[in-house]
Each structure stands twice: as C-alpha cells, then as structure tokens.
C-alpha cells in the first residue's frame, strides 16, 4: 500500500533494539504507511503487543519505494531481528532473496504463498479474502434499502478482485437482484494512498443510489469511509476493525486476521516451534471474520447475524462455494 510519508527516503525506527533483548521483531511496512488505519497499522499494533506482552525488541522499516525493501530488510536482519514480518505481496522478491542469507532469522511473509524456502525459515501466509468478503456482502445486501451497493478497491490487482468477488457473491446470495457498483482507484501503488480519489469514487456510487460501500483500498479507504459518513450512508471497513472511525456509519469491517498470524509466529519463534511453509487461511482456520462491537451495536439485527453465521458454517463445510475472482 502506498507510502504516505513521501518526505522519508529511507527511515528506520528502532524501538528497544538493544542487545538486552533475546528476541526482536522487525516489521517491513507495505506501501501506504504505518498509520493507514488498516493493513500496515494492524501489523504495527500487533508488533507493539508482541513487544509489550512477549518482551521482544522492535525494529521498523518504511521505504520510499519498493526498490529499497531488500536493502531495508537486510539492515533489519543485521540489527538483530529474530523475526521479520514482510507486509504485502510486493515484498516477495525481497523475502526470497534475504531469508536464505539469514537462516537463523524467521520470516513471516504476509500475502505471499509461492516462494521456495531453502532455509525453511519463511512462514508464508495467504488469506481467502473472498470468504470474509462474502459475509460482509451479505450484511450489505440485507442492510441496503435501495438495493444498490458499492465497492471501492485500491490497486487493480488479482488480490483486490478477491475482495470484490466475495462481496458481490455474498450480496447476490441474499438478493439476486442487487446492483453493485465497483471501482478500482488505479493501477499503480499510488492507488493505496489517495483518500481524495477514494472519496470521489464513493460519492459517485452514492449518487447512483448506493447506500452501503465496502472499501479494500488501504489508506485510500479513509476517504471512502469519510465520504459515506458525510453522505449519511453506510460503509464497510477492511483488514483491521475500522468500526470506531465513524460509529453508526461503518456497518462492520471485514477482518483479515494477520494480527493473529504475526502474534502466533512470534510466540512460536521464541519457543523454537516456528512453522515454516505455505499457509492458506480462510474462515475455517480463523483467518477472517467480521467486526461486531459497541460502535456498530444496533446496526446489525440478531436475525441478520444468524443468517450470516449460517452462511459462514456453510462455507466452512463446503456447502456454499465462494469463487476466487483472482483466478479469473
């Protein structure tokens, strides 16, 4: 996701990274910046939890562009990180190049699940985003009064098509006649950090009648949520729980539980039970969900939740098949 700290060419934030820490977690952020209120920030806050609860030191790296990722990852390893988290598919090449040179360091590659791993030190995590998006699509369709809903994606790539596809299929599961307006923000990494464009796309969908808009757009999504709140319609957050950003307007958030992935592998790396290999995480594995809390209490009726939970069970059992649009 797109780097919003353009003034920073290469930045290291070293937090408690002295030799007094037996274990250190290093986080290499994706485009969009550490405080995107979504994908990257979830990793940041999980790393803070690892530091506070597990006693790890903490090292962070943000690059101005993707060409600096490998250099930064090597520097984080050289500074003693025992577990390095690479956030996003754009870091796949860097992880593949760096991990074999640091066989005693463990790596978590988020949204990467195709690398060879000669040192057996990479936990590769991909998620079935279409499954979680199916559930929030159901909620959108049940909540919509107009029969029209929207989707705003970030960069037009297969990964984001998974979110869109699941959302549309879930909505159509509830209402076969639902109308879905879908837009991608762009085709470059700048699409992850353009809240102004996100707001414009959302307003255009609302003008067509959409009364629920789901965003899967990184920092761009901040503009989507704001525009929906300003217009008095509902929005749906993504990755992290974003219900708090506009209580009463954010209907729910599709949770991508990379926080659990990072925390669990930090525990296991410290205990010597780290799990390398490729891991595909869906509803059955607890890798996805939807957010219910005090901020959206009352927006989703118990009968709606019951219907969503029934569909969730159907997806897990295989009775309901959700097509992965990234394969189209």
Image (cartoon, rainbow, N blue to C red):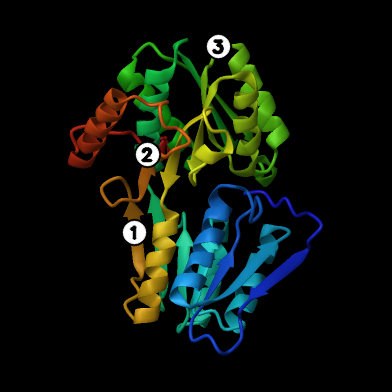
Whether tag 2 and tag 3 are in contact, CB under 8 A, the answer is no
Query: Residue 250, relative to residue 35: is it above or below?
Result: above
Q: CA distance from mark 2 to mark 3?
A: 25 Å
Q: What numbered label is drawn on residue 257?
A: none
* Residue 44 point in image, percent of width and height: 56, 60
Q: Residues within 10 Å of mark 3 (few under 14, many from 20)?
A: some
Quadrant position of the C terminus in the picture:
top left
Q: Residue furthest bottom?
A: 19
- On the image, numbered disc 1 is attached to which residue? 279
Is residue 118 among the parts visible in the rendering? yes
Residue 102 in the image, given as x and y percentages of width and height? 51, 82
Image-quadrant location for residue 119: bottom left
Earlier-in-chain disc, 2 versus 1: 2
Tell me the crowding category of disc 1: few under 14, some 14 to 19, or many 20 or more residues within 10 angstroms, Cα based: some
On the image, the x and y values in percent for residue 40 come to: 57, 54
Q: Which residue is mark 3?
A: 209
Quadrant for residue 168, please give it: top left
Judging by the rendered image, the residue that carries numbered circle 2 is 132
Tag count: 3
The earlier-in-sequence mark between 2 and 3 is 2
Secondary-structure class at tag 3: loop
Q: Is residue 19 left or right of residue 260?
A: right
The residue under the point 30% across, 30% down is 305
């Amino acid at each position: 996701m797109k780097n919003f700290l353009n003034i920073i060419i290469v930045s290291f934030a070293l937090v408690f990274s002295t030799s007094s820490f037996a274990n250190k977690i290093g986080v290499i952020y994706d485009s969009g910046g550490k405080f995107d209120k979504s994908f990257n920030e979830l990793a940041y806050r999980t790393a803070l939890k690892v530091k506070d609860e597990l006693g790890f030191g903490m090292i962070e790296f943000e690059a101005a562009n993707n060409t600096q990722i490998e250099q930064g990852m090597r520097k984080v390893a050289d500074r003693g990180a025992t577990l390095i988290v690479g956030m996003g598919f754009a870091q796949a090449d860097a992880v593949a190049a760096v991990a074999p040179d640091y066989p005693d360091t463990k790596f978590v590659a988020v949204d990467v699940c195709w690398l060879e791993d000669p040192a057996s030190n990479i936990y590769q995590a991909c998620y079935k985003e279409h499954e979680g998006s199916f559930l929030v699509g159901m909620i959108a369709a049940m909540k919509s009064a107009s029969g029209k809903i929207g989707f705003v994606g970030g960069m037009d790539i297969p990964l984001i098509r998974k979110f869109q596809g699941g959302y549309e299929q879930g909505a159509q599961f509830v209402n076969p006649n639902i109308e879905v307006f879908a837009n991608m923000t762009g085709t470059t990494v700048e699409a992850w950090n353009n809240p102004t464009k996100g707001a414009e796309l959302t307003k255009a969908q609302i003008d067509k009648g959409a009364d629920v808009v789901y965003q899967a757009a990184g920092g761009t999504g901040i503009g989507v949520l704001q525009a929906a709140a300003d217009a008095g319609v509902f929005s749906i957050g993504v990755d992290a729980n974003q219900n708090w950003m506009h209580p009463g307007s954010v209907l729910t958030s599709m949770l991508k539980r990379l926080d659990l992935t990072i925390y669990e592998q930090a525990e296991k790396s410290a205990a010597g039970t780290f799990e390398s290999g490729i891991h595909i995480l869906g509803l059955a594995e607890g890798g996805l969900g939807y957010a219910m809390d005090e901020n959206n209490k009352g927006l989703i009726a118990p009968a709606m939740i019951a219907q969503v939970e029934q569909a969730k069970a159907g997806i897990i059992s295989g009775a309901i098949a959700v097509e992965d649009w990234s394969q189209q």
